[in-house]
Amino acid sequence: MAVGHPTNTMTELYKQAQSRIPATISLPSQWLKSYEGFVTKNASSVSQIESALQSLTYIIPGITSALRYFHTSTLLLSLYHTSLLRRHFPSPSPPSPHTRYTTYFTARSRLYSQSAILLQTVQYTELLCEMFFKRRGGDKARWRLVVVLEVIKAICRAVMYWVTGRRTVVEGVGGERPSIPDSSSNTEVREEEDGSLIGGHSSDDEEASVKEERSKEWFMPRTGMKLPVLPTQDGESITDFLSKRVIGADDIKAANQLVRKIGSFQGQVAEMVWILRPVVYALAMQRLQGRNRKDWRPWLLGLGMEVAARELGKKEVRERTAGGWRGMTGLEKEELKRRGWSMAWWGMRGAFYENVTR
């Protein structure tokens, strides 16, 4: 009885395993493509599910680690879906200035795109990471993590500031989610068309609606030409319809001109102070390490830096921009207002929260 050599048997097994490795490695990419195809085909339903899940996290009382993990996962998944849908669907028409500006630099600079994505990812996950580190190592480990996260965010903002040519940092990756065609409305239209073809004639209600639309048409008295009804939405006035189609100064500007370059030294100092202010505040709080949460020094230092950055920025606008506040673009005004409203969060931080708000 002949017995095969052990070396030949091991060689055959090795070849079989080696032939199966490429197929096994390609499985994750195939699953990812299948998931992307599912999201693009059911984009409207996916967006509705995301909104429902995010609303659910706000309705459920109490903040637990499981709820925070669920909320963070939903935000990250929404960020991935937005980037995916942006590749398959057109941008909103007309796109907002924020979308035009961020899309311009995202497409031109890979470094800008990666910094913006990393910044948004850290912002979505920082609270969950703080809860985890505080549970494992207390306030000391928590504030060490906060310093690291704030340094990462400051580096991302500094990179975005440098890549854009020393322009005011506008956060966000590519703007809002692109417009998604409503599959349900298309289905209803097809059903109505199929029903009219099967029935052979329109119903009385349809005939009445057609007559009503024709009665709104206007005929020119001299030429007799017919002007169609404006395609306005229900309850929309003619003024609102026309105002949406008015072209403003920001609409005809190039995307990179929607935010001006900061030319003066005090303007650059103001932007760098605004970028570094969370790092300085986190370092000051880490030095206390929870010994005296009612100490006003870190709070006053952080708020003072933000107020100084805001006032230096306003002064730079008055001196370097033609027309001052009126000469700013809509996107610059929007970013300045956003930073102004974000100062209200100082009422929920540090000593102000411990001594006043709480």
Image (cartoon, rainbow, N blue to C red):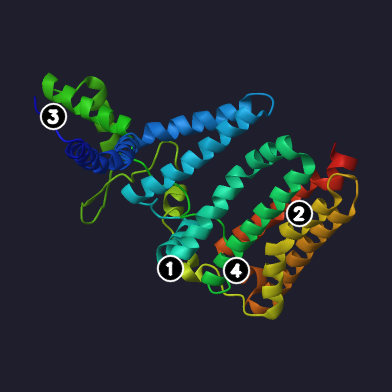
Disc 2 marks a residue whose amino acid type is Ala
Q: Nearer the viewer, residue 165 or 98?
A: 165
**Above or below — where is 79 with respect to 100?**
above
Front of the two marks 2 and 3: 3
Q: Nearer the viewer, mark 2 or mark 4?
A: 2
Direction from residue 263 to residue 97 in the image, left or right:
left
In the rendered image, which quarter is residue 106 located in?
bottom left
Provide the secondary structure element on which disc 4 rests. Answer: loop
- Give the residue pinned by disc 1: 252
Q: Is residue 106 positioned above or below 48 on the image?
A: below
Amino acid on which the number 4 mark rests in the picture: Met
Distance from Cα at disc 2 to Cα at disc 3? 73 Å
Q: CA distance from mark 4 to mark 1?
A: 15 Å
Between discs 4 and 1, the one toward the N terminus: 1
Amino acid type of the residue that numbered disc 1 sits on in the rendered structure: Ile
- Residue denoted by label 2: 282
x%, y% of residue 259? 55, 68
Q: Name the residue beneath numbered marker 4.
A: 328
